[in-house]
Amino acid sequence: MQTSANGINLIKQFEGLKLTAYQDSVGVWTIGYGHTGRDVKPSQTISSNQADQLLRQDLARFEQGVSNLIKVSIKQNQFDALVSFSYNLGLGNLQSSTLLRLLNQGDYQAAAGQFPLWNKAGGKVLPGLTRRRLAEQALFQGATKC
């Protein structure tokens, strides 16, 4: 599966676009739509086209990772929500999550209930993460607008 326009729009909305590298709330160097990695350096700048290209490259990795972790049938909106979740938190957190365990047991409703629990960074609840998790939860449950 690939992320739909709804999923991409959700990620873009919450990541925001930054054309100059910055440190996120836990000190990770970030650029574009939340792109991180060894290629991101202090004072680095990119164009909006480069940001879109980085997002597409990153999405491919997360789409593959989510596809590999999910053992049950899911709908496009659920896939999109899980890609957004993983894009923000990392595939390792999805892999070790109760959310994934419940989903792979076929308990879609209980899995959806797990999204809001992932609203902390550096041990602190962040309002932006709370909003994102609720938007991902709504998308997972079938809402098309976030």
Image (cartoon, grey):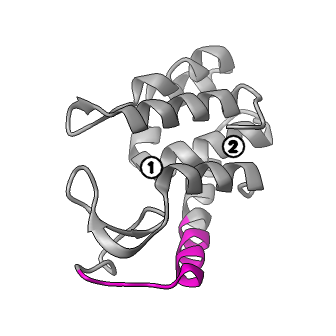
Q: Quick check: 49 left or right of 22?
A: right
Q: Identify the image quadrant of residue 123.
A: top left
Q: Is residue 86 visible?
A: yes
User: Percent x, y for residue 118?
Assistant: 40, 30
- Which residue appears at 23% of the width and 31% of the height? 124
Answer yes or no: is residue 96 visible: no
Q: Magenta part mainly helix, strand or loop?
A: helix
Q: How many marks?
A: 2
Q: Is residue 23 left or right of residue 110?
A: left
In the image, residue 8 sits, relative to residue 52, either above or below, namely: above
- Give the vertical position of 71 relative to 45 (above or below): above
Residue occupied by mark 1? 88
Q: Secondary structure at mark 1?
A: helix
- Disc 1 marks a residue whose amino acid type is Asn
Mark 2 or 1, nearer chain start = 2
Which residues are the magenta region? 43-58
In the figure, 90 relative to 127: above or below? Answer: below
